Each structure stands twice: as C-alpha cells, then as structure tokens.
Amino acid sequence: MQAYLDNSATTRCSEGVRDIVVKVMMEDFGNPSSRHDKGMEAEKYLREARMDIAATLKADEKEIYFTSGGTESDNWALIGTAMANKRAGKHIITTAIEHAAVIQPMIYLQEQGFEVSYIPVDRYGRIDLQKFSDAIREDTILVSTMYVNNEIGTLEPIEEIGKIIKEKNPKALWHVDAIQAYGKYRIYPKKLGIDMLSVSGHKLHGPKGVGFLYVRNGVKIHPLILGGGQQKGMRSGTDNVPGIAGLGCAAKEAYTDFDKKVTHLCELKQFFMEEVQKIPDTVLNSLPGDQGAPHIVSVSFAGVRSEVLLHALEERGIQVSSGSACSSNKKLPVSPVLKEIGLKKDLLDSTVRFSFCENTTKEELEYCLQQLKELLMVLRRYSRH
C-alpha cells in the first residue's frame, strides 16, 4: 500500500488542473502580450484566473498579481514595500518561526539598514501578542506574520494581530504568508486588515512554479522584476499562462465543497493524533482540533532519528517529511521552528511531519500508524544496542 502524507511539501495536481494546463500548452499557447487571436485567447485565461482567485478572497481582480510561487510572493511583499516606504521608517516586525522565504528577505533588509524585531512564540508556535503589541512603534512600516506554520501547523491569531496593528499603528503595512492556509480557511483580507497575502499553487493541487500576491489597492510597493511591463509594470516577464490557468482552476476547486473538505481533514487529524499519541515515548507538537491547521501534525518520536524513520517508512510506501521541504535537503543541525518552540534537545532530531489533503483516506493513516508502531519497536531496540 502507498500513503502519501507529505502534502504540505507539495500536492498532486487535480485532474481539472491537469486538463486545463495541457489544453493551454498544446492548443491555446499564445503569448498574452501578442495582439492576434492566439494572444487574446491567452489573455482570457489570465482574466478568468484573476476573477476566480479574487472571488475566493472577496477582493478586486486588480489586486491579484501572478508570481513564480510563494517564495517570490514573500520576497516581493517584503522587499518591495520596505524599499517603497523607507522614508516613513525602517522598522519591521515578524515572528521567530517564519518560513525561510520570509526570514532570508528580513536578513537582507537588515543588511540594507532596516531594523527587524523577531517576536517569540509559545510551546505550540503561537505569537506572544503582548510582546508583539509592545514592539509596534511609530516608525514601524511593515509587519509580516504567517497564517499557518508549515512545520507544526500552528494557527496564528490573525484577527487579534490585525486589531493590534490597527490600534497601535494603522499606517504600518501587514503582509501575511498564507501559503499553508489558503484553501484551508476562508480568508478575506479587507475584513482582516491584511494588505498583502502570499499564496503558492502547488500547495492546493495546482501546478508548481506559480503563485500569486494579493496587494491591496493603494499599497505602495516597488516591483522587483523589471522588463516588458507585464502586469501593469509591477511584475515583468512573459506570463506563465498554463500555470496561471491551472492556479485559477485550483483556487476555484479548493473552495468548492469547502466545508466538506475541511471537515474531512479535521476528522483525519483527530483520528491520527488520538492514535499516534498511544505510541510510547511520543510527543505531539501540533494543537488538536481547530486550535491548529486541519492538515498538519508534527510528532516527535524519542530515541529515533527522523532521517532514519523517514527512510524506513519510505521503504514501506509511506512518504512523510522532517520539516520544511525547502530546507530538508540541507544539512541543518536543527529546525529553527522546533528550537524556537522550546522542544527538548533530544527530540529536535526526532521529529516528523505528517500532512494530509482532501484525497487522504483513513485507511492510509491506519496503514501508516501500523507501520510506525512496528518500525519504532525495531529502531528503538536497535538504538539501545
């Protein structure tokens, strides 16, 4: 049996996404910048994708910009707005457990003379709201917080964060990395006070190499990619029409039968968490129920290195990960997220992330749990000798 449980790293494209991507690549392959009929056909796909995505956010179509994915969206939101608004101040706030696509631009901005405050989190990755509130200053121009943590599934208190920003400094711009949240939550940026929102296609059964950045009308932001003037000169480069069409399709599908899909994920999560904690020497790093994301469960198995367990599960047809797919191929001594939440030292290298999607079945989880029990008994016995 096969059990793919690494959906936070990437998801399989839906059949609808596959079909539209192939159609655009093979039939409607025009360049939307061309003025002939093929170009107009391509432009139509861009308009429809914008309409479908904007509808899910209750946003204006003009507020949707297509990018190469979540990393570019994060980079553009942070660097583009910081550079555009630096005369108003050079103070930026983020959390200590952001994805590398946010942390690395922050380091870059610090090198450019900006001051960055990193807000600590609790044992389950939730931002310290009091310290966050205290950190906001008159010269704070930008705040960046993730909606859902990609490693442990923390659901940040988005509504509270928005209210605090509005009360303390309404001029500060707020960027939200929603790469693990879009498609799992109904997100309405204007209602929440979000100025910019990053999304990646391949996290919701769309194509890889495409995403979007929501930018509220009126936000002052500089482009990072210059050239042909596409997307109103804000993001130049020939539009990835097949990818964008697939992204629009994926977004529309994600919010079709939405409640049913999320309920299914919640049931899977509850079942898996209840069963996995029955295994001896197991520590859950994710919160149960709606306190955390419905599709991510982080578990530490004392006495077994995650890399060893990963490969042992793989040999039995089960795919999981030890953390962020963007950094798991690097020889990092420890996950910054696990370190920040204060996980015990002996568990830092013994943590595995299980992540589900709408197509995950209970049978797959039962199979995974059974294999886990058997493997852990063997591996722990071996490690003691």
Image (cartoon, rainbow, N blue to C red):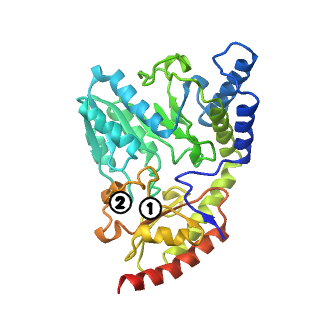
Q: Residue at x 53, y 62 (%)?
A: 289
Q: Secondary structure at mark 2?
A: helix
Is residue 252 depicted above or below 195 in this figure?
A: below
Q: Which mark is residue 138?
A: none
Q: Position of residue 250 (x, y in %)?
A: 66, 42
* Front residue (pair 370, 164): 370
* Front residue (pair 322, 181): 322
Disc 2 marks which residue?
338
Q: What is the three-letter code of the residue carrying label 1?
A: Ser
Q: Residue at x 38, y 75 (%)?
A: 302
Q: Earlier in the sequence, mark 2 or mark 1?
A: 1
Is residue 283 depicted above or below 360 in this figure?
A: below
Q: Residue at x 27, y 37 (%)?
A: 116
Is residue 180 depicted above or below 34 in this figure?
A: below
Q: Position of residue 108 (x, y in %)?
A: 30, 35
> Which label lies toward us, 2 or 1?
1
CA gap between label 2 and label 1 equals 11 Å
Instruction: Work out whether residue 217 can be spotted.
Output: yes
Instruction: Work out whether residue 185 can be spotted.
Output: no
User: Quarter of the image holding residue 266?
Assistant: bottom right
Q: Position of residue 291 (x, y in %)?
A: 48, 58
Disc 1 marks which residue?
322
Q: What is the three-letter code of the residue carrying label 2?
A: Leu
Q: Residue furthest top?
A: 35
In the drawing, does residue 252 fall left or right of residue 90? Answer: right
Label 2: how many residues lie within 10 Å, few (<14), some (14-19) or many (20+)? Answer: many
* Front residue (pair 262, 225): 225
Quarter of the image with the C terminus is bottom left
